[in-house]
Image (cartoon, coloured by chain):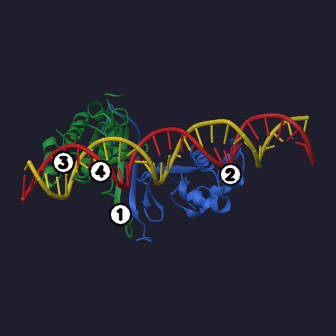
Chain colours: A green, B blue, C yellow, D red
DNA sequence: TTACAAATCGTAACCATTACGATATACTCT
DNA sequence: AGAGTATATCGTAATGGTTACGATTTGTAA
């Protein structure tokens, strides 16, 4: 299993002093079962089945909280933020992202390694490397 | 000079049957002088000095037109689309982008080259590789 | 079981972008 | 040069994703 375990995530919440709520468990459970990048709107649609009229505030507050706690990874794609459970392995990595189903494939090699020497005098903050397309199931 | 020439851009417009307008020249002139990624809002603020009350429609229509004609390159950054004059050399390349002044430094090597073999059965549409930070002038 | 901080609700505001009917303008043809 | 036409622009409203906030509810610790 590549993704962070639900229990692991819920215990991070507890340890950091955040409350346990059913909605939070359901949010994590949603990301666990879909296994790939999803939008706030995807999550809202899912939760609205069980909790009709759930607030935007709840959706976004929890997405941001989980991101701050490194439970979720995020990326900006097609003008919309996308979220997924953080990969378990701590090593720095990048992703192929399927534009149809949102599932990902990890890329272990990082292009930055070979480029450090080209940026003398620059301050490098971060970088983004993503490959987009269709996974074998969607192709 | 790395960027596409103004005259070159204006003749593309003419050849494709689009009209020459002073606003279009001013838009290209703006991107020529700032030499780096800028937002629609940056452009609006600039043009509003000369053409008070210029329409959003004009800004965005021309940005999209120029992008469709490959006169401008675009990237999504911090929830906002950013535009710059297309680099002159046709070769595929990536960019370092200064978060302070928007200026860029081309990266000639492309990480995709070494990765093709890892995606058997996948359909690769495109990819994004960008480095963010501060350039020597802003550091 | 009480008290309080945290979470959620309901809803409005915000920001970038898109859309569109009405008007103005660059270009072509005569 | 003048008229006709497709294109460009204006003024403004709508849209979509996200953020904000006062009022209310709820999980948790004492």
Disc number for residue A64: 4
Residue that badge 2 annotates: B10
Q: Give the quadrant of residue B53.
A: bottom right
To the question of a shared chain for discs 4 and 1, the answer is yes
Q: CA distance from mark 2 to mark 1?
A: 36 Å
Classify mark 2: helix, strand or loop: helix
Residue that badge 1 annotates: A124
Q: CA distance from mark 4 to mark 3?
A: 21 Å
Residue at mark 2: chain: B
Residue at mark 1: chain: A
Classify mark 1: helix, strand or loop: strand
Residue A18 visible in image: yes
Is tag 4's residue or tag 1's residue first in the polypeptide sequence? Answer: 4
Q: Are marks 4 and 3 in contact (CB under 8 Å)?
A: no
To the question of a shared chain for discs 2 and 1, the answer is no
Mark 4 vs mark 1: in front: 4
Q: CA distance from mark 4 to mark 2?
A: 45 Å
A27 relative to A98 in the view: left or right: left
Mark 4 vs mark 3: in front: 4
To the question of a shared chain for discs 2 and 3, the answer is no
> Is B98 located above or below residue B21 in the figure?
below
Please report the residue visible at 30 percent of the width from the left and 43 percent of the height from the top: A59
Residue at mark 3: chain: A
Q: CA distance from mark 1 to mark 3?
A: 24 Å
Q: Quadrant where the C terminus of chain B lies? A: bottom left
B97 relative to A58 in the view: left or right: right
Residue B113 visible in image: no
Residue that badge 3 annotates: A89
Q: Are marks 2 and 1 in contact (CB under 8 Å)?
A: no
To the question of a shared chain for discs 4 and 2, the answer is no
Few, some or many residues within 10 Å of mark 1 (<14, 14–19, 20+): some
Residue B18's spot in the image, x, y percent?
70, 43
């Amino acid at each position: 299993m590549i993704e962070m375990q639900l229990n692991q995530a819920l215990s991070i919440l507890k340890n950091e002093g955040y409350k346990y709520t059913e909605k939070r468990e359901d949010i994590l459970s949603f990301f666990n079962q879909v296994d790939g990048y999803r939008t706030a709107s995807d999550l809202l649609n899912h939760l609205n089945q069980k909790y009709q009229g759930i607030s935007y505030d709840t959706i976004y507050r929890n997405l941001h909280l989980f991101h701050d706690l490194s439970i979720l990874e995020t990326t900006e794609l097609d003008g919309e933020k996308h979220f997924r459970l953080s990969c378990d392995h701590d090593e720095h990595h990048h992703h192929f992202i399927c534009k149809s189903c949102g599932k990902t494939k990890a890329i272990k090699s990082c292009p930055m390694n070979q480029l450090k020497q080209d940026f003398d005098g620059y301050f490098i903050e971060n970088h983004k490397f993503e490959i987009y397309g269709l996974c074998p199931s969607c192709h």
